[in-house]
Image (cartoon, rainbow, N blue to C red):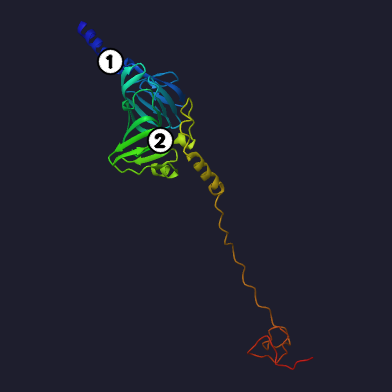
Amino acid sequence: MPSLRWAAIVVLAATLNNATPIMAAEAVGQAVVIKTAVTGATGPLVVRAPVHQDERIRTSNTGLGQFVFLDGTKLAVGWGSSVVIDKYVFDNENSVKKLTIRAAKGTFRWISGSSPSSAYQIVTPAGTIGVRGTAFDVHVAPNGKTAVVLLKGSARFCGGGGCRELKRRCDCVVATPSGAMSDVTKVNRSVLAALGTSRALPFLTGNQKLSGGLDGIGGNCGLAAAIQQEHEARPQQRNSPAPSPPSPGTPDPPSPPDPPTPGVTDDGNNGHGNDPGKHDPSNPGKSNGPRHG
């Protein structure tokens, strides 16, 4: 019996140690906005819930989470997203030596905090984003295709196709895990087509609303107005059913010819006043009879 009791204690201790690594870790930030469904390592998150290093945060298809880290860095996680707080190395209570975020899929808005720019790194399936006093949006499609839109400061995106410098507000680059990378251009509707969904970049299109200082950064780069104009241009075409083709119906039977009038011989008169028997065959509207008057 003592051996069995000891074995049970060992198993229980191992279970507890394996089940609560996140709870034992020191909190590196907290949730400040939670909408619909956002989950962390231990289940659903609520406002003021702590987040920890190595914790994966997921949102539902309508979910939204906003988080603030200890150095003031802000992160918004849009609908259908998954992100991991990969590294958070403390320097002091107001600064960190390293903060690495792994964006697996979905849409995110990042605003740098008070730590040195070299401390921040955002990793996506298509490349890595280095920041300098930066605010930007990033969308990661299910196939790993990634778009980065600069809102403030500057950023450098590096992947298999090289590096691109984003220096102006609304600068955008799109890259794939295979190394293909676009030139830097202003974000527009074609970026949504390249990402394969109109739900991409919802903070810029206006499909999701942010708060707490994350909403007014850099405007929406004209993307919301472009989407609205597109919707207003074709409301009837989208909503009106296509007209039905006319029904062929049943054709009426042909009418029988009128019977000839008794006593009248058809001499070719076309009804224009020709005299009977004097029809000009070369001009069926005129007569060869004598003219009067």
Does residue 96 appear to the left or right of 60 in the view shown? Answer: left
Closer to viewer: mark 1 or mark 2:
2
Which of the 4 image quadrants contains residue 118?
top left
Q: Choose the circle earlier in sequence order: 1 or 2.
A: 1
Residue reaching furthest to the bottom:
290
Q: Nearer the viewer, residue 244 or 247?
A: 244
Q: Name the residue under label 1.
A: 17
Q: In this view, does 112 lie above or below 293?
A: above
Q: Which of 141 and 203 is in front in this view?
A: 203
Residue found 56% across the figure and 48% down from its top: 236
Q: What percent of the width, then of the height, locates residue 155?
A: 36, 34
Does residue 193 appear to the left or right of 12 in the view shown? Answer: right
Does residue 69 appear to the left or right of 275 in the view shown? Answer: left
Q: Distance between the residues labelled 1 and 2?
A: 42 Å
User: Quarter holding the C terminus?
Assistant: bottom right
Does residue 33 appear to the left or right of 117 in the view shown? Answer: right
Total tally of numbered discs in the picture: 2
User: Quarter holding the N terminus?
Assistant: top left
Q: Nearer the viewer, residue 4 or 202?
A: 202
Q: What percent of the width, then of the height, locates residue 9?
A: 25, 10
Residue found 46% across the figure and 36% down from its top: 204
Q: Name the residue under label 2.
A: 150
Residue found 29% across the figure and 38% down from its top: 159
* Identity, as a three-letter code, of the amino acid under mark 2: Leu
Which of the 4 image quadrants contains residue 41?
top left
Question: Mark 1 Cα within 10 Å, few/some/many (few <14, many 20+)?
Answer: few
* Identity, as a three-letter code, of the amino acid under mark 1: Asn
